[in-house]
Amino acid sequence: MKTNNLGYPRIGSNRELKKANELYWSGKISAEELLAAGSAIRTQNWKLQAENGIDLIPSNDFSLYDQVLDLTLTLGAIPERYTEFARTNNSLDLYFAMARGAQKNGQDVVAMEMTKWFDTNYHYIVPEFTKNQKFELFSTKAIAEFIEAKNLGIITKPVLIGPVSYLLLGKEKEEGFHRIDLIHNLLPVYFEILQKLEAEGATYVQLDEPFLALNLTNNEREAITYVYNEINNKFPSLKIILANYFDCFGENIDTALALPVDTFHLDLVRCSLQLDDILDSGKLASNVNLSLGVVDGRNIWKNDFKKSLAIIEKAVTALGENRILVAPSCSLIHSPCDLDLETNDATLTPEIKQWLAFAKQKIKEVTLLKQLASNEIDHDYSIELAENTLANQDRKTSKLIHNEAVKNRVKGIKTGDDQRQNAFATRRIKQAEALQLPLFPTTTIGSFPQTPEVRSWRAKFKKGELTQTEYDALLEKETEETIRFQEESGIDVLVHGEFERNDMVEYFGEQLDGFTFTKNGWVQSYGSRCVKPPVIYGDVSRPTPMTVKWAEFAQSLTPKWVKGMLTGPVTILQWSFVRNDQPRSETCTQIALAIRDEVVDLEKAGIKIIQIDEPAIREGLPLRKEEWADYLDWAIKAFRSSASGVADDTQIHTHMCYSEFNDIIQNIADMDADVITIECSRSQMELLDAFADFKFPNEIGPGVYDIHSPRVPSNEEMVHLLEKAAAVIPANQLWVNPDCGLKTRHWDETKKALIEMVNAAKKMRVAATHLETV
Ligand code: 39S
Ligand code: ZN
């Protein structure tokens, strides 16, 4: 029996990579220093895994920004717009320009699109393909990192996204072909990489094909068969571990089982029945091994050893120990690094802490499971097993988890509780009357720059170096300045800026009962940006109002409308570590009721426009379409429950980002928000087509500029996008806003961009009046 790990967090247990990247981008450290920081993290990770008994240690799981972008560079799939930049810059800066865009020395390139990695909160950079897309070995990162580990005495298992999934992750940038057709151009470059790895001494290579968990077309399935047969023909002695995760093989199972690979990795957390399916099918070739993903790579609960051992033993009985690998369910990049760093007993109490395991602890679990399950026991592990059993038992029976009042409130929900008093058509008239907004009203998505200064106030406040009064006074000043800036620049619907919030989910998690949070439980979200997902361990309720004070304060400063800002129940669920002892739908409904109370309290405090963000509704969709309807039913109901406690003339906004809406547009309409603002600019308004084709009834704010890049767009660019929008959506339904919150931006670029945005709206108004008079 072997232990197998699919990937280890690369941010460093104290976010060393984030800090190094940001210093490099601001010119404070050199490229050499950045690369050294990356190398130090890799060395630490490899050694940690080696010391903790992992047999198949991954390499090339490290990335400075994103592993999909790494592969794009490796394969030389560099979009043409970077040609000039690539000629005059080194490949590191080219890499970051593709990730973030770049404006320097008169050069101005926009970033590549970014989107969610399956149903996670990780974002990857979307590959762009043309009809005659050429691939060539452009970067040898995968090989260099294998050699780097070899020089440390560790023979690793290089990890690459498989060729079929790589193509499917991308997007066609011109008409007339499907990206899967590029497989013949692509495969030779993979051969080159595999050949170099084998020559350097690699025996195992992990190829990730997570698309095997999705509904594939026949063409795509045929590509899988073709690719893995070709690889086997060319590299008969290379051991290919084909990794699937996040869901079952589903109807792809026969295709998968027929592949000539060394090992299949299965996610037995997301698809617990997969093992039985495979063993019962009798279709597993007798020389093929199974990597059993029994340790949850996406959640923080301690593994239940008894349950996992039962699974492992079943596989051992059927196949024998030699054909079994024990593994986490997926790469551990979705887990925080190290529970040992959580030393704040007041928030993460010892009782709850003993229920948890982060990446480092999961590595140990994998090894312990192998030791417990294997017959060659060199040590008595009964103490470890007893400890694990006790912790799991304690969690099941803990008084911390259950709240009867919450359970009863959920049971008491009646039909109609998730509906506004009147339909949108009626509400719209009342809202227009009450709010008196111009055509093309301008607004922002909610957050304003979270400067290092603002963060340092919070850090000092948390350390006790600032009193509550001092901290509040600083936030009040920042809020007031933000209100004044918005007034001066002519924005119509203002926001308070959210300076009091560390994160749009964690902030609520900190105030809701049934949640706890960590000090250092960071997980990469995109590039250098990390999140600290709160932990939902029990029934959820809201002891006191969470946002009313700041909304009220901001509204008191200005005669203009200030929008109240909340995070919706589905997003809070999706971006937290959730209970695995009850259905997600149940937890979501509990959160929805807590948010509903907050919405009602905001209205009582005089806030007439309330935004309930649901950026995660799309990413929460199950990977397999068969399961969509059930999810959408409870998710949309939860949103509506949270929004339906207010009068008709209170305007409910929602916001979503990075989403392909085409296939769920009806469900988005069913959310019945009065206004929806969406990410659109990186895709040049392509996303709007879904709303236009559907004749989306409610108001829409298609984002007119990309806030994920420091680049300042001109008002002409935004007018161009707005004209595209106005060509498909009636002008009186359109709002003008950036495509996401501004917390990651600096003030300088934010101010410039918003002034340009207001100018763009003004031009649109002039053009509209002109049209009317003609
Ligand atoms: N998921 C979540 N949960 N939240 C989101 O906003 C989003 N947005 C989308 C999708 N998914 C999301 C895009 N993703 C960030 C993170 C994810 C994003 C977008 C942005 C982001 O800005 N993260 C910050 C970062 O990585 C951390 C935010 C945070 O929690 O830099 N900040 C804390 C705070 O403000 C702690 C900040 C911190 O690092 O209080 N403090 C320092 C430290 O602990 C000390 C600061 C000092 O002394 O100056 O070392
Ligand atoms: Zn957004």
Image (tube, rainbow, N blue to C red):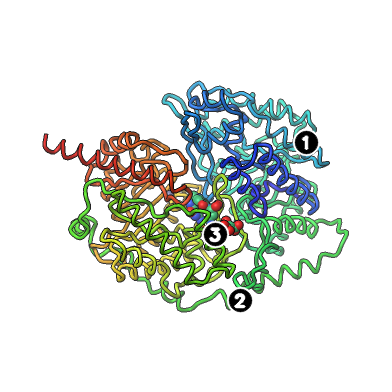
Q: CA distance from mark 3 to mark 1?
A: 48 Å
Tell me what residue is drawn at x 80 percent, y 69 percent.
383
Residue 554 at what x, y percent from top left? 35, 63
- Tally of marks: 3
Q: Is residue 443 visible?
A: yes
Q: Are marks 3 and 2 in contact (CB under 8 Å)?
A: no
Q: In the picture, residue 456 is in which quadrant? A: bottom right
Label 3, on which residue? 456
Q: Is mark 3 within 8 Å of ligand 1?
A: yes
In the picture, measured across the screen, residue 516 lies left or right of residue 445, that is right
Vertical placement of 586 versus 221: above or below? below
**Extreme left residue here?**
773
The amino acid beneath tag 2 is Ser
Label 2, on which residue? 398
Q: Are marks 3 and 1 in contact (CB under 8 Å)?
A: no
Residue 746 at what x, y percent from top left? 47, 47
In the picture, measured across the screen, residue 557 lies left or right of residue 658, that is left
In the picture, measured across the screen, residue 737 lies left or right of residue 245, that is left
In the picture, measured across the screen, residue 117 lies left or right of residue 374, that is left
Q: Pick whichever of labels 3 and 1 is earlier in the sequence.
A: 1
Label 1, on which residue? 203
Tell me what residue is drawn at x 50 percent, y 28 percent.
129
Where disc 3 sits, the SS reads: helix
Tell me what residue is drawn at x 47 percent, y 31 percent.
109
